């Protein structure tokens, strides 16, 4: 693997740092940065970004950082740091908006944490830009084309989101994919955006 590009490296270090801080600091630290549903009264304007730096467990952190390294590194090298960061922010914000709509619809008071929304945006972009690239799945360990990987994960997220009860923000993941898709369409001057 080539060296990790700077934005991806900084984001991974920031997420690891926030996770360590959440273990050492009182619970209010994480509560202040998590994405709270509007109805709880705990929502703050910085939370649609800050929630992406928090993770609920070492496994949550590990898999998100592995995905950020795998997909984000290549996209950052392709786009450059500035465009890559814009894309990630769009995915994280879209994930927050969709998750807020979903929690309002079902009346959930549970906050959301994790970089998964941004990661799913990166996953979608990787599948659209490198559709025939082979990805080695972890479970089961077999190669699969990126476009099929994205379709499978998107379908699973939709199915699991409606089944509910897992404690995972599936609609935040779908929102991240939507934000990434819209950002790519915007850059290309495709509907619903005008020519650029």
Image (tube, rainbow, N blue to C red):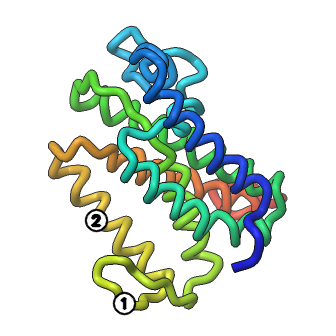
- Numbered label attached to residue 156: 2
Residue 23 pos. (x, y %): 43, 29
Q: Residues within 10 Å of mark 1 (few under 14, many from 20)?
A: few
Say which quarter of the image contains residue 169: top left
Q: Secondary structure at mark 2?
A: helix
Residue 35 pos. (x, y %): 45, 27
- CB under 8 Å between callouts 1 and 2? no
Residue 9 pos. (x, y %): 71, 55
Asked if residue 181 shows in the view, the reply is: no
Asked if residue 123 shows in the view, the reply is: yes
Residue at 42%, 88% (x, y): give it.
Answer: 144
Direction front: furthest residue: 24
- Numbered label attached to residue 20: none
Q: Residues within 10 Å of mark 2 (few under 14, many from 20)?
A: few
Give the residue number, with chain letter if any, for mark 1: 142
Say which quarter of the image contains residue 189: bottom right
Foreground pick, 88 / 18: 18
Say which quarter of the image contains residue 83: bottom right
Of the two numbered discs 1 and 2 on the same chain, state the one appearing first in sequence.
1
Residue at 53%, 43% (x, y): give it.
Answer: 94
| Image quarter hosting the C terminus | bottom right
Foreground pick, 67 / 189: 67
Q: Is residue 172 left or right of residue 107?
A: right
| Image quarter hosting the N terminus | bottom right
């Amino acid at each position: 693997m080539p060296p990790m590009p700077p934005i991806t490296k900084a984001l991974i270090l920031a997420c690891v740092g926030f996770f360590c801080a959440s273990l050492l600091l009182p619970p209010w630290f994480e509560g202040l940065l998590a994405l709270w549903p509007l109805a709880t009264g705990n929502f703050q304007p910085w939370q649609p970004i800050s929630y992406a730096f928090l993770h609920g467990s070492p496994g949550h952190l590990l898999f998100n950082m592995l995905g950020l390294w795998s997909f984000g590194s290549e996209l950052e090298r392709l786009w450059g740091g500035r465009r890559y960061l814009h894309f990630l922010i769009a995915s994280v914000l879209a994930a927050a908006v969709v998750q807020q709509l979903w929690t309002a619809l079902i009346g959930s008071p549970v906050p959301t944490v994790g970089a998964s929304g941004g990661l799913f945006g990166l996953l979608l972009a990787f599948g659209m830009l490198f559709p025939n690239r082979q990805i080695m799945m972890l479970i089961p360990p077999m190669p699969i084309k990126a476009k099929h990987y994205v379709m499978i994960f998107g379908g699973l997220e939709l199915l699991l989101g409606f089944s509910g009860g897992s404690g995972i923000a599936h609609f935040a993941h779908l929102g991240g994919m939507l934000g990434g898709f819209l950002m790519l369409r915007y850059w290309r001057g495709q509907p619903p955006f005008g020519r650029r």
